[in-house]
């Protein structure tokens, strides 16, 4: 599996992602610059967290016009894998590769803390190795993480099994009291109908190193690698 991690002006999680993929998981990784017009033959593209273009206009609204995104869209349309984390998720919705939008947190404050997640489906490459009976503790760090869509879109997401993570209590129960940003139905991550494009607000790359005393995020990457090896 060959990964490509895209760096936009303002990205700040690209090197974290490269470290996890290359040094911890021993995968082949290529750094891609936002002005590149080639994906260098990668199998899996990752749009990392950060503040692309300073989050001017809306988060991800300018980054979608970067030259690399034309190739990312083509890659996804061919069935290639794409994952956006935090700002990367925002870029994917702005680019039309995922439905919905990421709005300002309901309290209008930047939130940086650990949250609890439960997989809503195990029918995607990044969740098939996870357990719906287990809670995963993953950090968030965002000011615009409130997932929103209309009711028709939400019904389609639910009917097509496209909701991949929800914020939850430590016992796995999903309730509004443990919704950190006001996301619709506690949604923390979704995928496209083809299940090859994924977006999530929490940062699994920040919970993948034993030095940090949390490897819950690594389970997501392990799930992906196991799927691709099968």
Image (cartoon, rainbow, N blue to C red):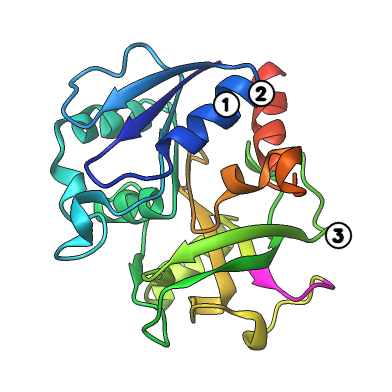
Query: Would you say 171 lies left or right of 108 here?
Result: right
Nearer the viewer's eye, disc 1 or disc 3?
1
> Residue at horizontal 69%, vertical 54%?
121
Asked if residue 13 is positioned above or below residue 35 in the image, the reply reads: below
* Secondary element at image label 3: loop
Question: Could you tell which of marks 2 and 3 lies nearer the N-terminus?
Answer: 2
Q: Quadrant of residue 105?
A: bottom left
Q: Is residue 168 magenta?
A: yes
Q: How many marks?
A: 3
Q: Is residue 128 visible?
A: no
Across and down, in percent, residue 198 comes to 49, 45
Q: Cα distance, mark 2 to mark 1?
A: 5 Å
- Label 1 neighbour load within 10 Å: few <14, some 14-19, many 20+: many
Q: Position of residue 3 (x, y in %)?
A: 47, 22
Question: Is the Cβ of the residue at disc 2 closer than 8 Å to that at disc 1?
Answer: yes
Element carrying mark 1: helix
Mark found first going from the N terminus, 1 or 3? 1
Q: Is residue 222 left or right of residue 44?
A: right
The residue labelled by disc 1 is: 21
Q: Callout 2: 10 Å neighbours few (<14), some, many (20+)? A: some
Looking at the image, residue 33 lies above or below residue 62: above
Residue segment shown in magenta: 167-171
Instruction: State how far apart marks 2 and 3 are (Cα).
Output: 25 Å
Do the residues bearing badges 1 and 3 touch, measured as CB atoms within 8 Å? no
Q: Residue at x 49, y 76 (%)?
A: 183
Label ID, residue 133: 3
Q: Which residue is mark 2?
A: 25
Q: Nearer the viewer, mark 2 or mark 3?
A: 2
Q: In the figure, 127 relative to 228: above or below?
A: below
User: What's the magenta bit mostly, secondary-structure-wise?
Assistant: loop
Q: Is residue 2 above or below residue 176?
A: above
The question of residue 208 being in magenta is answered with: no
């Amino acid at each position: 599996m060959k990964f490509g991690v895209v760096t936009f002006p303002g990205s700040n999680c690209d090197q974290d992602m490269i470290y996890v993929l290359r040094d911890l998981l021993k995968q082949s990784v290529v750094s891609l610059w936002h002005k590149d017009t080639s994906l260098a033959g990668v199998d899996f593209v990752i749009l990392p967290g950060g503040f692309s273009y300073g989050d001017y206009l809306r988060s991800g609204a300018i980054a979608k016009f970067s030259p690399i995104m034309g190739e990312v869209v083509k890659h996804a349309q061919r069935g290639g894998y794409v994952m956006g984390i935090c700002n990367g998720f925002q870029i994917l919705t702005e680019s039309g590769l995922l439905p919905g939008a990421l709005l300002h947190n309901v309290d209008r404050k930047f939130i940086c803390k650990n949250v609890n997640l439960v997989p809503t489906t195990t029918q995607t490459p990044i969740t098939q190795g996870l357990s719906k009976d287990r809670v995963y503790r993953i950090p968030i760090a965002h000011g615009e993480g409130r997932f929103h869509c209309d009711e028709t879109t939400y019904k389609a997401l639910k009917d097509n099994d496209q909701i991949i993570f929800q914020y939850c209590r430590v016992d796995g129960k999903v309730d509004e009291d443990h919704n950190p940003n006001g996301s619709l139905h506690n949604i923390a991550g979704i995928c496209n109908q083809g299940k090859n494009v994924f977006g999530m607000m929490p940062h699994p790359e920040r919970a993948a190193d034993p030095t940090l005393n949390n490897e819950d995020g690594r389970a997501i990457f392990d799930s992906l690698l196991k799927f691709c090896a099968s």
